Amino acid sequence: MITLLSAPSNLGLRPPEPGSVPGAAKAPEALREAGLFHRFAAIGAQDGGVVLPGRYVDDDASRAAGHVRNETAMVDHSRRLSARISAALHAGTAPLVIGGDCAVLLGAGLSAVRRGDTGLVHIDGHTDFRHPGNSEECASVAGEALAAAVGRHWSAVADIDGQGPYFSADRTAHIGHRTDDEEQEEVRGILARVTPAADVASRGAALVAAESAAVAGPNYWLQVDVDVLDPTVMPAVDSPDPGGLSADDLTALLRALAPNAIGASVTVFDPDLDPDGRYARLLVDILAEGLGGLGSAVHAA
């Protein structure tokens, strides 16, 4: 069984413009309106409720050096989201976290490390590997979440409650970055497998999924940032870059990876960029078809 959890956090994103608020926090309810929860309920999923974040603040003018934006609120949300994910896992269900931005990976990571024996398959249009060792611009965990998840960030986000790293780099696979990604060579030297979006199209989703699952191990968390899709398919994200996946390729990837995932998170859809709801409806189709089997192999064992 799948447990749907809403995590409407935008705490890890930079403001679209000074003083404004990113729209990704609206994603869970926009996807609910587009039929996501109904589609999953039809296959037996349960609604696990919402984990509300603290207030988003544009703190660029006041944030001290060595800290990410909205840090205190983000850590608090990560702890509470982790508790809800862990409860779902303890009940023998597969949590499906609907974000929000991809800083929700911190909460998933806290649950994964406490569970033990958990790898990570990270699907994203970017490597999300900006960190203090390669950039002076660190501030937005949404662009730094994978680095934090494997312990390459400030301890406030990479070592919450002394639990970091949340995932071992040698059991982490990344899929979906573009060929001009600034951190791709560094990531290739750290993670067990790194596959650009172009390889999914040329080599096939089934093969890429199998290779990624092989390094992540028999139990892994599946993180899906929808900016992995090409902007001709999904423009309603904060960083749409050309060269992404087709809807069919992402659906095939998810369908292949979902059964052996202990749970999953879906992030960075921005309803403010989807005024008529067409991209929400497309995303509902992709997720319902791709993640319907989430955890089926893990939780049946």
Image: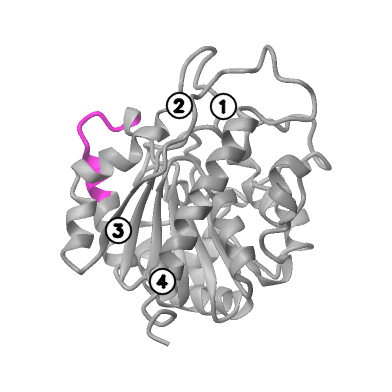
What residue do we see at 23% from left, 53% from top? 37
Query: In the displayed image of the protein, which residue is found farthest to the bottom?
Result: 301
What residue do we see at 30% from left, 71% from top? 1
Query: Are there few (<14), some (14-19), or many (20+) residues within 10 Å of tag 4?
Result: many
Q: Nearer the viewer, residue 253 or 77?
A: 77
Display colour scheme: one colour
Query: Are there few (<14), some (14-19), or many (20+) residues within 10 Å of tag 3?
Result: many
| Residue at image mark 4 | 258
2 or 1: tag closer to the N-terminus: 1
Which contiguous range is marked in magenta? 273-282
What's the CA distance linking mark 3 and mark 2?
23 Å
3 or 1: tag closer to the N-terminus: 1
Q: Are marks 2 and 1 in contact (CB under 8 Å)?
A: yes
Kind of residue at disc 1 = Arg
3 or 2: tag closer to the N-terminus: 2
3 or 4: tag closer to the N-terminus: 4
1 or 4: tag closer to the N-terminus: 1
Q: Are marks 3 and 1 in contact (CB under 8 Å)?
A: no
| Residue at image mark 2 | 22
| Relative vertical location of residue 300 with respect to residue 100 in this rendering, above or below | below
Question: Of helix, strand and loop, which one carries label 4?
Answer: helix
- Of the two numbered discs 3 and 4 in the rendering, the one whose residue sits closer to the viewer: 4
What's the CA distance linking mark 4 and mark 2?
29 Å
Question: Of helix, strand and loop, which one carries label 2?
Answer: loop
